[in-house]
Image (cartoon, rainbow, N blue to C red):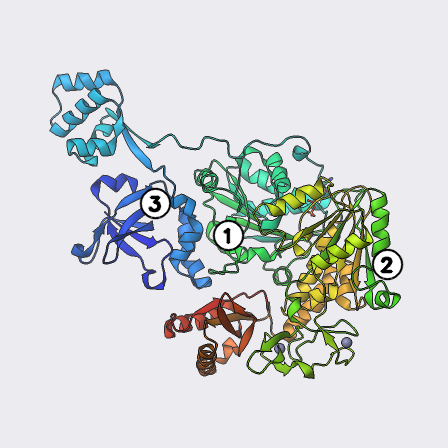
Amino acid sequence: MYCSVILRGSVRQTDNLYTYRIPEEMRSDVNCGSLIYVPFGKGDSERCAVVVDITDSFEGDEGVIKDIASVISSLPVLNSDQIALIDKISERFNCTKGDVVELMVPSCVVNHKNPVEVFAELVSKETAQEVLDSETLRSVAHINILEYLLERGKCTRKELMSSLSCSSAQVKALEDKGLVRLVKETSDNEVPVISVSGGVPEGKFTEEYDLSDEQETAIGEILKGIDEKKDNTYLVFGITGSGKTEVYLNIAKKVISEGGSVIYMVPEISLTPQTINWIKGRLGDSVAVLHSRLTDKQRYEQWNNIRTGKARVIVGPRSGVFAPAVNLRLIILDEEHDGSYKAESHPRYSARDIARMRSKITGASVVLGSATPSVESFYAANAGAYKLLELKSRARQEATLPEIIPVDMKEQVKLGSGDMLSLPLRQAMSVAFSQNKQVILLLNRRGFSRTLVCEDCGEPVTCKNCSVAMTLHNNRRNGTQSLICHYCGYTIPSYEARCSFCNSNHFTKAGFGTQQLEEFLHSVFPHEKVLRMDQDSTMTPGAHKEIIEKFAAKEASILIGTQMIAKGLDFPDVTVVGVLGADLMLASSSFKASERAFQLITQAAGRAGRGETPGKVFIQSYRPDQPLLQFACTQNYRAFYEQEIEYRQKLNLPPYKALGEIVLSLPEEDLLIKRANELAKYLNDFLGFQDKKYKFEVYGPMPCVIYELRGRYRMSFVIKAVNKSAINGVFKRLIADFDHTKYPMSYDNDPQDG
Ligand code: ADP
Ligand code: ZN
Ligand code: ZN
């Protein structure tokens, strides 16, 4: 027998299907999906591989075929729907099949030291003795085996075969005669026996509600879809607090009661003990949780429970989409718009896309949920590709939406209150402290330090073609500074910048950081304790969790931080939220800046007034009248969407056209510029020849927003085309035509950040 394998983590040169012979004694241990070691290459070094096909015969030169070295896991590590996904993912995300195997089979599985072994034992000693005594057995091997087992008792089949030089077929024959029993067991006792969940929480976590009509309808629709076993996708569009979680829990419960499995993804940052308790409390001990803080052993345990079907609900971040779920019927993506569902290093996959691909293969339904859906998803729902289910009111009657108050910072600066905390916000904070309540201050710094903003009106310098903020680059050769648009490459010297809003030419690298804010708070509210959550304060593992726990325990009354704190946290005593520097969120150089700002403000608002006291949210801006902030303040997602989709259409951005980004990076700057220009010429020539129907546009080369990274300089190209497969076609050509060692490029067909 032979098997075809994919090498785990293969590079492009070794990304083929390789055929190996299965030695006789391993035949019953090698299945489709088994994980094995194979000798590979000239030196026959051992490589980890997964079996994707098994055949009786092999057409070709038998002499070159090698034997499998050993079996790591006989029990499949991939089920058939996952194997079917491998090619599709490698095609869609421009990675090797081996990269996909690596995503699906985490290293804890490869390193797991408890290989399953086959043991042989006698069904009954008496019968065996009788058979031997009756001298009816013709085969010497059969006699030897029975005698060996009578003498020594249970042993591994391997031991039998090597001690007696018999074959597995001969052992099998005795099994067929009902004399020997073959059992698969792990060869040592280290097998995890701990329950999947580590205890099911009780009390408030198990409480069930009478569903609202809207919840009832959504649940009914989705359950109908799940029964159809078609690739149905639902978008649950429900305001914060509308009880989306309740919808997910109800449908998940139904699916597991029918023997199906559910993948339930939440953004990494929301994967808190709180969230996990809610899910476990309601769905019981068939929940497996995959998160980044697990040790290898714990991760293996969870993973193994999933593949054996013991765990039926898989809770995890984006990587959960690869879980070896048995009889997968439902995939949930909570907060589907969240950026963490997209991987930002190779392979740059999107969990949302993979969920849809998996759904096509398995017939599992996909449920996307959000209060602020991504523009792409809402567009798909409007176009009928997804079914839209709306939850328009808050689930708990007593919960009211917080009041969202725009604050004009131009006036505040004139009044002398400075550019950090406006008077209305400061007053509300004082009131909150006097009532023993808490305050969250949100300061989003993402990318803004590289843009210039108008000193007079707070507007960033935007590209005349693309309306995104231009990024500031230092030209170290001649000491000048330029502003560059990251989407079309439009460049101006920084002294030529004019504010597109008020025509001023005074610009500054405005903004302040979380540390400055913290110091300022100490001077204004010297008696209040402040916790700060940003990239610096969460460098060490567990720091994030620790800050949240301290704040929940009310060890501090103020929590300040970046977008990290806006997501999914539930602090009932927070009554005031301040969004500082709302303009700077919009000044990011990404085409998703508006979408992100709207999402962030909505989420921040969702943090206020989760308990009995209604909340207040202050949005500080130099231009509080701009439409986006108005839409955010009135929580009018549809109005926001209408404005945004018009902009996307005008500029041929997703969802109207697909976007591709190619980044070339080299340690020497001169060489980078030379090669980038060669690449530009190639791209322009090549795309110039293509059929007009693909609607290719190519921009670049231009320096990346972050030009220097880990000792390399980086230039990018942006391509627009009708769809992702056209973009992938270009990537494939580049991969084939350029030597990766000379032209190290990365490819992204869904770039999120400018
Ligand atoms: P979302 O995820 O849509 O923001 P949640 O699922 O967090 O909303 O629900 C908000 C609050 O309402 C939670 O405290 C939840 O327990 C409660 N809740 C959900 N459904 C109901 C219901 N049908 N009746 C009463 N309370 C509910
Ligand atoms: Zn531009
Ligand atoms: Zn201005």
At which x and y percent is residue 694? 50, 76
Residue carrying label 2: 423
Query: Closer to the camera: disc 1 or disc 3?
Result: 3
Q: Residue at x 78, y 69 (%)?
A: 626
Q: CA distance from mark 1 to mark 2?
A: 52 Å
Residue carrying label 1: 359
Q: Residue at x 50, y 31 (%)?
A: 195
Answer yes or no: disc 1 within 8 Å of ligand 1. Answer: no
Front-most of 718 and 438? 438
Choose the circle earlier in sequence order: 1 or 3: 3
Front-most of 728 and 609? 609
Instruction: Report which quarter residue 571 is drawn in.
Output: top right
At which x and y percent is residue 342? 55, 58
Secondary structure beneath label 3: loop
At which x and y percent is residue 610? 76, 45
Secondary structure beneath label 2: helix
Q: Is residue 339 visible?
A: yes
**718 on left or right of 568:** left
For label 1, the crowd category at 10 Å Cα-Cα, with few meaning under 14, some 14 to 19 and many 20 or more, is: many
**36 on left or right of 150:** right
Choose the circle earlier in sequence order: 3 or 2: 3
Amino acid type, mark 1: Ser
Residue carrying label 3: 34
Query: Closer to the camera: disc 1 or disc 2?
Result: 2
The answer to whether 363 is drawn above or below residue 273 in the figure is below
